[in-house]
Amino acid sequence: MTTQKDTWTIAGREFTSRLMVGTGKYASFQQTAAALEASGAEIITVAVRRVNLDRSKESLLDYIDPKKYTLLPNTAGCYTADDAVRTCRLAREAGMSDFVKLEVLGDEKTLFPDNEELLKAARILVKEGFTVLPYTSDDVIMCRKLEDIGCAAVMPLGAPIGSGLGIRNPYNIRIILESVKIPVIVDAGVGSASDAAVAMELGCAAVLMNTAIAGAQDPIAMARAMKLAVEAGRLSYKAGRIPRKLYANASSPLDGMIV
Amino acid sequence: MTTQKDTWTIAGREFTSRLMVGTGKYASFQQTAAALEASGAEIITVAVRRVNLDRSKESLLDYIDPKKYTLLPNTAGCYTADDAVRTCRLAREAGMSDFVKLEVLGDEKTLFPDNEELLKAARILVKEGFTVLPYTSDDVIMCRKLEDIGCAAVMPLGAPIGSGLGIRNPYNIRIILESVKIPVIVDAGVGSASDAAVAMELGCAAVLMNTAIAGAQDPIAMARAMKLAVEAGRLSYKAGRIPRKLYANASSPLDGMIV
Amino acid sequence: MTTQKDTWTIAGREFTSRLMVGTGKYASFQQTAAALEASGAEIITVAVRRVNLDRSKESLLDYIDPKKYTLLPNTAGCYTADDAVRTCRLAREAGMSDFVKLEVLGDEKTLFPDNEELLKAARILVKEGFTVLPYTSDDVIMCRKLEDIGCAAVMPLGAPIGSGLGIRNPYNIRIILESVKIPVIVDAGVGSASDAAVAMELGCAAVLMNTAIAGAQDPIAMARAMKLAVEAGRLSYKAGRIPRKLYANASSPLDGMIV
Amino acid sequence: MTTQKDTWTIAGREFTSRLMVGTGKYASFQQTAAALEASGAEIITVAVRRVNLDRSKESLLDYIDPKKYTLLPNTAGCYTADDAVRTCRLAREAGMSDFVKLEVLGDEKTLFPDNEELLKAARILVKEGFTVLPYTSDDVIMCRKLEDIGCAAVMPLGAPIGSGLGIRNPYNIRIILESVKIPVIVDAGVGSASDAAVAMELGCAAVLMNTAIAGAQDPIAMARAMKLAVEAGRLSYKAGRIPRKLYANASSPLDGMIV
């Protein structure tokens, strides 16, 4: 068994945990903090538009130790490139981070990304020196364009935000993994532990989720489940699984199956 | 988060680990022992026909601490009820256990169970006081018959032994879970960590595997991956996952999806 | 394009249509007759227990031209081998047919077959000279046993009767096709046209359905849809589909995918 | 059974066949013509860059009766908006058609669309009076943007061109169908008859394919299989399929399952 550390990096920063978590939709800041703790996450996303940046009253930021976590401000609620760019600048001015999770949504109903606006925003933000992690579709060409622009990672969705449908098209994720060199992080769609494990078994660098934990009946237990699932999936990927066969004595493996 | 112990029982014996592992196909007894340790399993199966029962020379049993593990002799390699019954008696005479994992295979190629012979053997063994855990198809009626006979658990396959195809028909497993009261243990078919998590998320009591670990490129790492995956899947099941929806704001959940 | 006739045979009788249909659950005998006509079926199943055999009053049989259709009496509603055998003898005495579709159900809730009782009944009926077409699980060993007993075909389910879930485990159907020489007919589970096409593309000889047609909002239209789907699936199978690949220029085909 | 005609329209033109076919990759023009005939297609796509427009020597166009088929010039082989726009103008000048199937590919390896360039080209072509049918990803927001631009239909892919993987993400197709009012035509990915039927059962207006027919071992037989499959799938959709249930007597349908 490999005993060397299995770390990964974004833009030169090294991380051990491969589970990134959001901070929305919890019952209280206390519950948020407990779930973060249980998840073992090192990187947590915070919606710039929803957090009280001036700290004049109680804020999520009071519950998050900036020494312990890497804060990743996100542009949740932005529907145009302009909005998203402005939001990122605001986060930087407030001293949050140069790392941003870039979301430009296409509509309020499905929360799918608007990739045309996303590209525009990414181009501007990269030029302004931000480390950009864009939330996008499982679209191979978009992911490569985002890499070419200079994004630090790509974050294709597994399924719509909050849907809990898991990774609906692992074939696309696999082609994305073949097509880009920057870290691929599955963002959105995870519903249960096995979904998170599947993301890691495909070879993704990490997985990001929010609703799956915050919306569970017991968010703290689910945070721990996801921590273990991501570790399990990563270990399973590295341990080298047996080939799939129709039955053990079948002469040829079923190379085509993905999940 | 629930902090009470999450144990389960077979025939009055209580267990904490929900991962049961086989002991075949390893490179050496040392590797077997290390994989068992990494898996955290409490119940391990041993093929009666393949172990050196008289201990005249080196035996797998020299590497397994009977105080630490519950040994579950299995009838691997038996193709008739008579053979299987004889093998169980032999295990009992050798002092191994009254607990038996009952396998009656239908052929050497696919290793599917012969359920007609299985029922015959189970009826005899239950009458003789064995605690019988039968390996069977994902056949709802067979599972209920095995319960009616007095088996202590049912062990439907997820996919053929050694295939690594995962749980091919979660719908059947779900109906089996609705239909019997004894523990349902998915046996055979698991290939990767996510497969094991799926079994637990369906609500199974435990999962049993051998090839997925022993046949991995790094069996010890895979044993640990499976340990974590089973814990993750169980926790995910108990934590109460979010409902599946076409998208988060869809009015109705997708109750029908299983995995 | 092959222009030779593409027929198949059961016990020496030759058929062209590969769609077999049931006659239950229709709104009226007129609707039944119209659906049969639209389906193009040559073989139709009739529940011996539900048809008025003595013809004293209006009967389904008044609406079915015995010169046009091969009647296949079935033992729907039988839960033991004895019941099923008795029902077959009754059908023979009434002059219906020596061909029987043998069903022995395990319970009223799921309508899954009881394969232990099925084997018993099949052994008796074959000895008595019946041509037996047994409804069974997608269990490879059971199918082979039924072939060994002398059944004329095997009819594994795609999914539970009336579920409309399609072929839940095409891997099992594929192994059954590899394992027996008699015709394999998918029976039960079909919900839509594509399900029927999948059965044929797997290489099955035929497909049997009832609820999918009788329970559709427009049964006559659905009967025609199923007729076309079975022809489409069969033609697609024979025409030799392109290999599956991750993308067209991928170097190796994805042999493992089945559907 | 509904006897009224089941037609559909693009930009005011009415069609009966819902199978659109490409004309590339055949062994000969004779084979192309025979496959078109067998497919029953009314709309056929022709790669502007690959057809001999000046007719100085033998051309595919010699084999296609323009009175019988609606020719849909496509921009296969174009990798930028400029290229694609130029190609459409060329087709118009050559008198081919104002209807164009707009393809702007992202790379030669995967043949996935470049949706950013596609939007650019679509905006220009719509302004120039073309009737634009764009090939795109199964990306809901892109499809809506293409509708807003004024495209006459959207053509999301089922899977990569030539992959034969079928409709990998029916959930996305379903959300696209909910989100746009123009016809949704699944383009690319179909491998077998059941794939085509699935597209129609989801409620798509039509399906377009090329490799699945031209690359089959018997293209003419496969063309006929696809004709029947599209008719079967459409009829099945209109006939109103039975609800999916875990088993027939289950109290609630499985609304969430899509295929």
Image (cartoon, coloured by chain):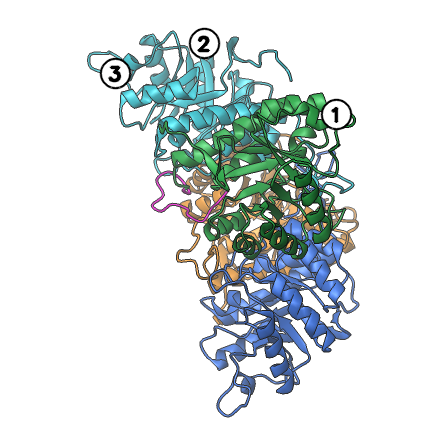
Chain colours: A cyan, B green, C blue, D orange
- Residue drawn at x 45%, y 9% as measured from the top left: A129
Chain identity of mark 2: A
In x, y percent, where is residue A28? 26, 24
Query: Residue D81 vs residue C179: left or right?
Result: left
Query: Residue A108 vs residue C71: left or right?
Result: left
Q: Which residue is mark 3?
A: A59
Residue D53 visible in the shown view: no
Query: Residue A141 vs residue A84: left or right?
Result: right
Q: Quadrant of the N terminus of chain C?
A: bottom right
Query: Which secondary structure is most common in the magenta stretch?
Result: loop
- Residue drawn at x 65%, y 21% as measured from the top left: B34
Which one is nearer the viewer's eye here, B133 or A202?
Answer: B133
Residue A102 position (above or below residue C232): above
Density class for disc 1 (Cα within 10 Å; few <14, some 14-19, many ≥20) is few
- The disc labelled 2 sits on which kind of residue? Gly
Residue C104 position (above or below residue A231): below
- The disc labelled 1 sits on which kind of residue? Ala
Residue C59 position (above or below residue A221): below
The residue segment tinted magenta is: B245-259
- Residue drawn at x 57%, y 69% as measured from the top left: C80
Q: Which residue is mark 1?
A: B27
Query: Residue D176 vs residue D84: left or right?
Result: left
In x, y percent, where is residue D119? 49, 34
Residue B193 falls in image quadrant: top right
Chain identity of mark 3: A
Residue A145 visible in the shown view: yes
